[in-house]
Amino acid sequence: YEAKRARNRYVVYTDELDSSLAHRREVETALREALDSGEGLDCHYQPLVSASDGRVTGMEALARWHHPELGAVPPVQFIAVAEETGLIRRLGEWVLRTACSRLAPFDGLFVAVNVSAVQLRDDRFADTVFDVLASSGMPAGRLELEITETAIVNADAATVRLLKRLRRAGVRISLDDFGTGYSSLTLLKDLDVDKVKIDRSFVQMAPMADDSAAIVRAVSNLGAALGLSVVAEGVETEQQRVFLRDAGCDELQGYLFSEAVPEEGIARVLDRLPVREAVHSEE
Ligand code: C2E
Ligand code: MG
Ligand code: MG
Ligand code: MG
């Protein structure tokens, strides 16, 4: 293979390009089938905990997909294909519906659902959210929509209006992967976001690297000044946990507490981690 590559780079490159396009096409077809049949798609849940006392505050829904031939397709891969093809609208609605129905009985917990920029470009999205809330019995005040900072930076006026409409109804907006995009302070203020989730690249470097530590502290101070809640994602070590708590983060999320678990695992997570008083399942 190395010899072939050295001899004719261009041909190898073209082959790789073709196979990657073919692969994407294959993923697209398979994903469409999965959405039609509901087979192989799953929703996992990862807890967020209060930084001060470790109690579970909510759960983030994360899409999972297992295909009979492709195997477990990594979310970054199938989400990208879903965004390119518009399938994210159906996938996103499926995750929203599944997560709200599943978590509605857990009174004191919020549910966080990731929303793609593609979904926000559709002004029917707000009605979809209201429909899901009504049919699942999830109160608007317990739903958080996670939107990447990059999606927000590129948001047009219609998207801003849509987000405001959702917020007026009580839905919270959380900026995901914060620090990787280039949002301005004005934008944070104008959009009235409720939460920022500091990207795990800063979180994981923070206790060691001075610049990451400074960024985490700055975002935490900014959050306090603007009345935003600050979450650190990707917390893996006790050293990170202590640093982030002392830096003033409100909530933490990461493998240190729990990875994302299938719905059958939620009860076990809530047994193992301390939970706020109000949380109970009516099941
Ligand atoms: P995200 O929303 O920022 O989610 C966090 C990702 O980091 C998840 O990966 C989670 O499993 C992983 N993670 C959590 N704690 C740790 C940790 O301590 N260490 C490390 N190394 N990783 C951790 P996952 O599930 O593979 O999802 C990747 C991304 O795919 C998500 O990033 C989100 O942007 C996207 N995604 C997943 N599900 C959905 C969905 O339903 N809709 C949309 N639009 N995007 C989704
Ligand atoms: Mg997220
Ligand atoms: Mg993130
Ligand atoms: Mg998992």
Image (cartoon, helix red, strand yellow):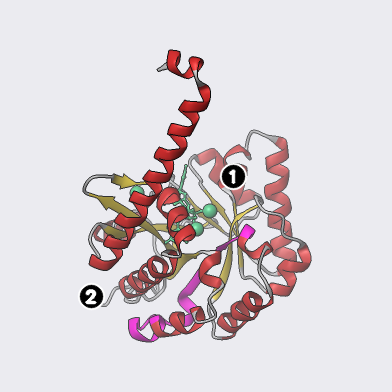
Residue that badge 1 annotates: 203
Front in this rendered view, residue 159 or 134: 159
Residue at the extreme right? 186
Residue at 48% across / 41% down in the picture? 236
Q: Is residue 82 left or right of residue 180?
A: left
Residue 239 point in image, percent of width and height: 55, 38
Q: Is residue 97 magenta?
A: no
- Residue type at mark 2 is Glu
Nearer to us: label 1 or label 2: 1
Residue that badge 2 annotates: 283
The part of the image, by quadrant, that contains residue 4 is top left
Q: Distance of mark 1 from mark 2, alpha carbons?
A: 36 Å
Residue 83 point in image, percent of width and height: 48, 60
Residue at the extreme top? 3
Compared to residue 51, the image places residue 167 above or below, namely: below
| Quadrant where the C terminus is found in the figure | bottom left
Residue at 31% across / 76% down in the picture? 105
- Residue type at mark 1 is Val
Mark 2 CB within 8 Å of ligand 4: no
Q: Does the magenta stretch include residue 148?
A: yes
Secondary structure type for disc 1: helix
In magenta, the rendered stretch is: 132-150
Does residue 44 appear in this view? yes
Residue 137 point in image, percent of width and height: 35, 83
Marks 1 and 2, the one that precedes in the sequence: 1
Q: In this view, does 105 lie to the left or right of 207?
A: left
Does residue 146 appear in this view? no
Q: Is residue 191 left or right of residue 177?
A: right
Residue 15 point in image, percent of width and height: 43, 32
Residue at 61% across / 70% down in the picture? 194
- Which class describes the residues within 10 Å of circle 2: few (<14), some (14-19), or many (20+)? few
Front in this rendered view, residue 238 or 195: 195
